[in-house]
Amino acid sequence: MERIGFIGLGIMGKPMAINLLKAEYQLVVYNRSKPKVDELVAKGAEAAGSPREVAEKSSVIITMLPDSPQVEEVLTGPDGVFDGVKKGSLIIDMSTISPVVARNLSEEARKYGASMLDAPVSGGEPGAIQGTLSIMVGGSTEDFERAKPLFEVMGKTITLVGEAGAGQIVKACNQIVVALTIGAVSEALVLGSKAGVNPAKILDVLSGGLAGNKVMEVRRSNFLEHDFKPGFKIDLHHKDLRIALETGRDYGVSLPLSAVVDQMMSSLVARGDGSKDHSAVLTLIEDLAQHKI
Ligand code: NAD
């Protein structure tokens, strides 16, 4: 069995790493803040003092970090993964980052005799805990086949979507649909509620027809109870819309609806709500209408 390195033990990374431990993989872990490492060590993982040490001690290295700069730092920075990576090792970045950065890092990995997959996920914290994430993968078929047993521990829908960077492109598409759906559900709830209808009834009815969607189902209580403990932080979804808009610019694709929701999230971040769940977009629509559902 391959020895697995895992870097980035946040909301997503921690449960993903725990699932690998449960599947009896040997894990070497590193995180910026130490308490998360200690938790994993208590469950049987080995602690490493730097990303370099993780790379030296494992043949597959998984990263689950916030954004492109952190992935670049962990891979290419001092005491980074590239300083310790062995020939033939496989790096799997499961964070959501820029497709361009993903492609560049994959080329860089090759210079060290290693290879790389971009494998961002959807399905959120519950999917990470239950091991039912959707994993969209960019890279070679050979690397995909090698990583598949690990993906099967962490996820359910596992798809090779193209060459390096393609996983991140599909993830950007995913984040557009989720963001716009949150915006649409929020507007519907505020309109219906201010016009006198019980918002729970609105969700019940809409979920039975063409308007039905997963956001409504999974975030139902967040909307109805104003429970905005993250889940998925606005800061991170705002970052994902930035990636989508930049990618749109790179390819000459206009994304007017994404731009509007991006601006709404900018406002939420500016007023200090960046660490709330993305369903808190509802509160901005509520403020515009001067009505709380
Ligand atoms: P998080 O902020 O909870 O976790 C990030 C972790 O990385 C933290 O433990 C932090 O200490 C660590 N970290 C940050 N910089 C580091 C560095 N330089 N070196 C080592 N460790 C470092 O974020 P998350 O919600 O787990 O998200 C991780 C990635 O997964 C993001 O790209 C996010 O967009 C994506 N994602 C999140 C969700 C979700 O629902 N939370 C769903 C799908 C995808």
Image (cartoon, rainbow, N blue to C red):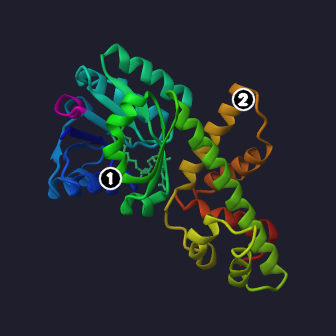
SS at circle 1 = helix
- Amino acid under disc 2: Arg
* 157 in relation to 147, above or below: below
Residue 85 x/y as whole percent: 25, 24
Is residue 12 found left or right of 90 in the rendered image? right
Residue that label 2 marks: 249
Residue drawn where x is 45% and y is 42% of the image = 95
Q: Nearer the viewer, residue 128 or 228?
A: 128
User: What predominant SS class does the magenta segment belong to?
Assistant: helix
Residue drawn where x is 26% and y is 26% of the image = 79
Q: Nearer the viewer, residue 160 or 183?
A: 160
Identify the mark at residue 94; answer none if there is no mark.
Answer: none
Range of magenta residues: 54-59
Give the quadrant of the N terminus. top left
SS at circle 2 = helix
Residue 249 x/y as whole percent: 72, 29
Could you give the CA–CA distance between mark 1 and mark 2, rounded to whole angstroms? 36 Å
Sequence order check: which comes first, mark 1 or mark 2? 1
Residue drawn where x is 30% and y is 17% of the image = 113
Badge 2 density bin: few <14, some 14–19, many ≥20, Cα 10 Å: few
- Amino acid under disc 1: Val
Asked if residue 293 lies in the magenta stretch, the reply is no
- In this view of the protein, can residue 159 be seen by the observer? yes
Give the quarter of the image for residue 279: bottom right
* 21 in relation to 144, above or below: below
